[in-house]
Amino acid sequence: EGAIGLFGEKYGERVRVVRLGDDSVELCGGTHVSRAGDIGLFTIVAESSIAQGVRRIEAVTGMGAVAHVQELVDVTSEAAGQLHAASVQELPERISRLQAELRARERTIAELKQKLATGGGGAADDVVVVDGVKLLTRRVSGADAKTLRAAADALRDRLGSGVVVLGSDIDGKATLLVAVTKDLEGRWFIAIGSSSPASSTS
C-alpha cells in the first residue's frame, strides 16, 4: 500500500496502518483514534530540525488547539488595538509603517549625535600644533563607536591636515578613536599620558 516502516521503530506481526485521505499512508505513529476526524482541529505550534534532513513538528489538537487559536486571537486583537488598527489584517501594514518611522528617527538621532560630537560648528579651540602637525582632541560624552567614527571623519575633513583624537566613555569603558589625514599616514605618532586603559581604533 506504500506505507514505509520507520528506522528504529519496533513492529509486531500485525501492524496498524493509518490512512489520511489520499495524501498519507503511514504505519502507526502513535495515534490512538479510530478515524482522523476524531482528532478535530489540528494546529502546528512549533517546527525544528532534529537531524540532517529530518524535521520535527509539534502540534495541539482538539480543545487544546481551540484554546491555542483563541489565545492567538486575543493577542492579535490586543496588538491591533495598541497600534490603532481597524482589524488584525491591518497589522502587517501598521508594523511596516512603524519600522520605517523608527529607522527615520534613528537616522535623525545619529545625525544629532554627530553634530554634538563635532561641536556643531568650528573646532578651532580644540586644535594645537605638535611638531608642526595640527592635533585636534576632544572628549565626547555618551557617544557610541559608530558616532565616534562619523565624528572623527567629519572633524578630519574639516581639519584638512592633521590628527584627530576622540575619547568617550562607552558602557563604563574608556574608548579612544584616532583619525589621521592621508598626507600624514606615513608618519609615526606616539600618544603619551593616558591615565586609564583604553581601546583604540584608527
Image: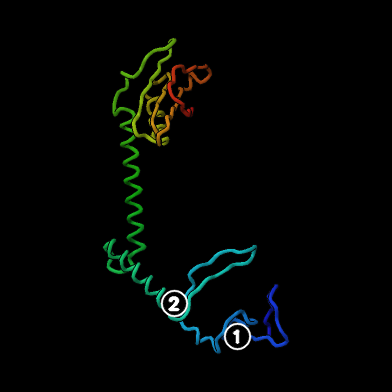
Q: How many marks?
A: 2
Picture disc at residue 19: 1
Residue appearing at x 34%, y 34% in the figure: 142
Q: Residue at x 57, y 82 (%)?
A: 31
Label 1: how many Cα within 10 Å (few below 14, some 14–19, many 20+): some
Amino acid type for the residue under numbered disc 2: Ala
Q: Position of residue 45 (x, y in %)?
A: 48, 70
Give the crowd class for mark 2: few <14, some 14-19, many >=20 residues within 10 Å: some
Q: Position of residue 100 (x, y in %)?
A: 35, 52
In the image, which disc is placed on residue 65? 2
Q: How far apart are labels 1 and 2 at the CA level?
A: 22 Å
* Amino acid marked by disc 1: Arg
Residue 146 placed where, x, y %? 41, 36
Q: Quadrant of residue 134?
A: top left
Q: Is residue 87 left or right of residue 187?
A: left
- Residue furthest bottom in the image: 34
Measuring 48% from the left and 29% from the top, which residue is drawn there?
Answer: 199
Q: Nearer the viewer, residue 25 or 68?
A: 68
Residue 51 picture quarter: bottom right
For the N terminus, the image quarter is bottom right
